[in-house]
Image (cartoon, rainbow, N blue to C red):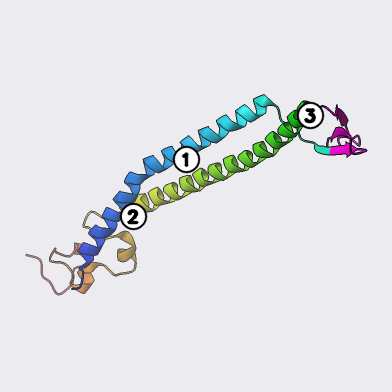
């Protein structure tokens, strides 16, 4: 069985409406995920981030070697105490975890920005389609291309006077 244009149009409109109804919950999930990641980042930062490499001197003394700033490299002696070494390593791991979460935030924000762009594009398309409808039901681009339904006999409505055949006499 072949579908009519009207049936296909109705199905497409229903599909768009279904997608539109899903948007609020999808956006809420993104917002919740963003908030959760930012809370974890805040907790990691509050616990202390260490951006340094570990270094053992003489296989006995633990040091933290920080990135070079202004031509100087900071070295911090941690010592041989297992608790201090464990805390320093935990700080290094928190720094790595924080950076991964920062990448997650960027990805979520990118998805939200892309969604905003696509929603704006959809609104533009729908608004522009509505703005091109003429009072007689035709679209302006069709009339501009001389594809008006009156020229092809696709309507029972009377043709506008501007395009009515000249052979018709007006009473």
Asked which secondary structure carries label 2, the reply is helix
Disc tally is 3
Q: Position of residue 15 (x, y in %)?
A: 30, 55
Which residue lies at the image location 47% right of the left edge and 47% below the top edge?
A: 115
Asked which secondary structure carries label 1, the reply is helix
Outermost residue, left side: 171
Which of the 4 image quarters holds residue 6?
Answer: bottom left
| Contact? badges 1 and 3 (CB < 8 Å) | no
Is residue 40 found left or right of 6 in the rendered image? right
Find out whether residue 90 is within the magenta segment.
no
**Which residue, given by chain and number where applicable, does mark 2 sit on?**
129
Numbered disc in front, either 1 or 3 = 3
Considering only order in the chain, which callout, 2 or 3, is on the residue closer to the N terminus? 3
Disc 1 and disc 3: Cα gap in Å?
41 Å
Which one is nearer the viewer's eye here, 150 or 75? 75
Which of the 4 image quarters holds residue 88?
Answer: top right
Which one is nearer the viewer's eye here, 167 or 12? 12
Numbered disc in front, either 1 or 2 = 1
* Residues rendered magenta in the picture: 55-81
Asked which secondary structure carries label 3, the reply is helix
Disc 1 and disc 2: Cα gap in Å?
30 Å
Q: Is residue 145 above or below residue 90?
A: below
Q: Is residue 119 above or below residue 93?
A: below
Asked whether residue 162 is in view, the answer is no
Disc 3 and disc 2: Cα gap in Å?
70 Å
Quarter of the rendering occupied by the C terminus: bottom left
**How many residues crowd around disc 3 within 10 Å: few (fewer than 14), some, or many (20 or more)?**
few
- Residue 30 circle label: 1
**How many residues crowd around disc 1 within 10 Å: few (fewer than 14), some, or many (20 or more)?**
some
Find out whether residue 62 is within the magenta segment.
yes
**Which residue, given by chain and number where applicable, does mark 3 sit on?**
82
- Residue 95 circle label: none
């Amino acid at each position: 069985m072949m579908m009519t244009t009207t049936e296909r149009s109705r199905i497409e409109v229903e599909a768009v409406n279904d997608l539109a109804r899903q948007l609020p919950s999808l956006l809420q999930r993104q917002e919740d995920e963003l908030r959760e990641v930012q809370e974890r980042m805040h907790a990691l930062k509050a616990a202390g981030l260490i951006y340094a490499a570990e270094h053992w001197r003489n296989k006995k003394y633990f040091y933290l070697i920080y990135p070079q700033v202004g031509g100087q490299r900071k070295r911090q002696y941690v010592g041989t105490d297992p608790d201090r070494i464990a805390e320093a390593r935990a700080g290094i791991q928190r720094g790595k975890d924080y950076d991964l979460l920062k990448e997650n935030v960027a990805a979520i924000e990118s998805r939200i920005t892309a969604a905003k762009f696509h929603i704006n594009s959809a609104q533009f398309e729908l608004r522009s389609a509505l703005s091109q409808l003429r009072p007689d039901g035709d679209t302006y681009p069709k009339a501009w291309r001389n594809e008006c339904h009156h020229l092809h006999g696709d309507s029972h409505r009377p043709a506008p006077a501007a395009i009515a055949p000249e052979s018709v006499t007006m009473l």
